[in-house]
Image (cartoon, rainbow, N blue to C red):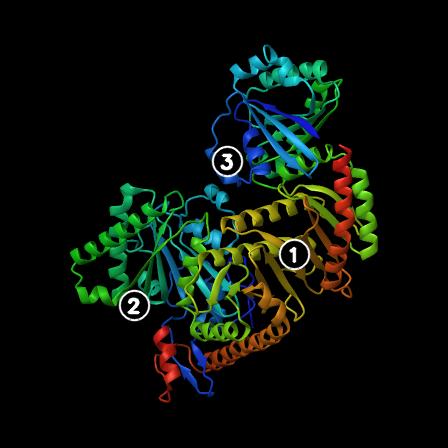
Amino acid sequence: MRKKVLLMGKSGSGKTSMRSIIFANYIARDTKRLGATIDVEQSYVRFLGNLVLNLWDCGGQEAFMEHYFTAQRDNIFRNVEVLIYVFDVESREFEKDIHYYQSCLESITQQSPHAKIFVLIHKMDLIREDQREAIFKAKEEELKNYSRPLDCHCFQSSIWDETLYKAWSQIVHKLILNAPQLEKNLHDFAEAIEADEILLFEKTTFLVVSHCLKKEHSDLQRFEKISNIIKQFKLSCSKCDTSFQSVEIKNGNYTIIIDLFTPNTYIMVIISDPRITPALTNYNIKYAQKHFENLETSQEQRT
Amino acid sequence: MSKMMSSSVIDQTSSLSISSQNILSNGTIVDFSVGSMPANYGYDESFSKEDDEEDSNEESSQFKPRILIMGLRKSGKTSIKNVVFHKMEPNETLLLDPTTKTNLEDISCCSFITFQVYDCSGQIDLFNDPTCDYIALLKGCGSLIFVIDAQDEDQYTDAISCLTQTIFKGYNINRGIKFEVFIHKVDGFPDEKKMDIYNEIQQRANEMLIQQDATESLIQKIYLNYHLTSIYDHSIFEAFSKVVHKLIPQHRQLERLLDFLCNSCGLERAFLFDVASKIFIASDCISPLDTQLYELCCDKIDLVLDISNIYAPKDVEGISADDSSYTCVKLNNELYLYMKQVDKFLAFVCVIRDEIFVENRGIMDYNLTLFKDSIKDILSAQKTVSQDQSVNNQNNTNSSEPDTSNMANNILGNL
């Protein structure tokens, strides 16, 4: 099942960097070497087995932008599932940015009226920490106004921390077909093995695709933090020509197991009951693997 | 008797000093000192903000070795200190202001060693500054790290002449100083270029030393070591680890303990890490240090610490050290990375093959409890001795007990 994702925004706003980090295993520092994208760069990313994301990274230089709204309009804006528009928070040409954004929205309304729209306020690391919330809220208000009557979801992001993962997790989550079913199954599984929390990650990008919470946790940013942490470790391992299969952390307060689950996902189980040994949890995970694999293949067969 | 010292971010909970007492297997206590002088040794007020605390806490500050970090302006000294000891992200160091005053910091690096790091301002010429008592500074110095910016080729000559000047002055004041040159900021260069720079700087430094009237025999006597480093990868941690090794008197003993453990449990590699700074205190000597494995272990510690911080209950910090806790990462090339906390600051990390791990898990855990106990013994012996000593005398003595066995001589030679 192919889903077309449009990535647009002014030149230098960070589209290609983001895409490289999430999907191409770049570390934030490596993105300095990226040059301006020429015209449209298409890439295909396999996600969760049955889903193929067809990413259209559209170069943001003015010459190209003008072209998109005229000669290439049909080609670019047709059949779009998701439009991701990136704003550089430090941009001095806000008027111009809005102008292009609205042209995009116009074209989308005409060609792909059902597309979901996401707006990323990017490069938030350049703003001082105490001012970030305020600035983000202000921009969000403005953009929601400009987007009417269409609905848009706004996120703040930066390639230097975990907010990037949060934004992209949400975006990708909307594209997954069987999300509710997955969550229900995960919930049943958590009940059965008495876990506090279970997270399901996609294998290559480590974005959280589903989660189930039995016990409340105070840190709401933990999903993206964990994505970030594990991804960094994964990248370090690949530098040493190896990759990790599983992680087991046990101490008096909790047991955490991260393991390969289905061919496309990793699972993370957090258990705080000290009587449940890691061996038992591992056994349970192996046992449940089959069931979840079947879920995935039946999904694939359907599409 | 542990009092918070200075602006150290890492909590200091032990008052251990490096009076360098080693407990030998036959129980003889031999005293060889490293040559550190008490910290409150005639220092200028403007130099160290912690003078008052130090005065009142004499015994604990007494035998701390000092590491000086020197170098030209903008060579990277403060960044190095922050990245290694304060867990700063490398890219955040770009926001650091230039150091105007020389900062003294007390680092509690595991419970073995508490040392002081002097981050010298590159803008002040230490030897010409009248307010600075550099003689006292250098007398108490265990290692002097000189940082050279490898990317700034124009400054090589200045840097090297400053280096040679420092070496001469330092050697004349304190013969025991170990000079370590960090050829820094080499992350941008390909490997060949790195070796070229390494050789070039080494050569030029030697030439300049000879120029300044140093004889061959003198050059042989001066302990001078070069390292290629960068804060953007693990090379800085490795280099710092090697520097710290030479300042820990029990280093050889720890290595032997690890060798023994490796042999008995069939481990590929074993490290004793300081969790906070990711410096490894000791590693086994069975094979030469494999940088990749070291990096993997460092990253693993990062992973575990970060995840633990998210899920730990509010009052618990870091990783717990009880016997049943462990962390295990399985890699897809049939290797396991196994980590067990030894005490609050130290972690034992080993690399072990799949099959062996599964078979010998029980034996290994048992051996590890023995290992933990040995380390605790070394620690507590150190403590009692230092307490005795501080009661008896205020200054270090350079004497060693007449009764020395071969083992003692070996250890002394490795210090």
Within 10 angstroms of label 1, few (less than 14), some, or many (20 or more) residues?
many
Identity of the residue drawn at 64% across and 60% down: B317
Q: Return the residue at label 1.
A: B308
Query: Do the residues marked 1 and 2 share a common chain?
Result: yes
The answer to whether residue A164 is seen in the rendering is: yes
Residue B246 coordinates in the image, percent (x, y): 39, 67
Viewer-nearest residue: A268 or A47:
A47
| Residue B174, numbered circle | 2
Amino acid type, mark 1: Ser
Residue A208 coordinates in the image, percent (x, y): 69, 42
- Chain of the residue displaying label 2: B
Q: Which quarter of the rendered picture does the C terminus of chain A lie within?
A: top right
Amino acid type, mark 2: Asn
Quick one: which residue is furthest to the top in this view?
A: A70
Residue B331 coordinates in the image, percent (x, y): 58, 56
Task: Assign a secondary structure to mark 2.
Answer: loop
Mark 1 vs mark 2, CA separation in Å: 44 Å
Q: State whether residue B105 is above or below residue B380.
A: above
Task: Say left or right for A163 vs B262.
Answer: right
Viewer-nearest residue: A178 or B281:
A178
Observer-side mark, 1 or 3, equals 3
Residue A198 coordinates in the image, percent (x, y): 75, 50
Query: Do the residues marked 2 and 3 share a common chain?
Result: no
Q: State whether residue B409 is above or below residue A94.
A: below
Q: Return the residue at label 3.
A: A31
- Chain of the residue displaying label 1: B
Observer-side mark, 2 or 3, equals 3
Query: Do the residues marked 1 and 3 share a common chain?
Result: no
Q: State whether residue A51 is above or below residue B226.
A: above
Viewer-nearest residue: A187 or B89:
A187
Task: Say left or right for B194 vs A209.
Answer: left
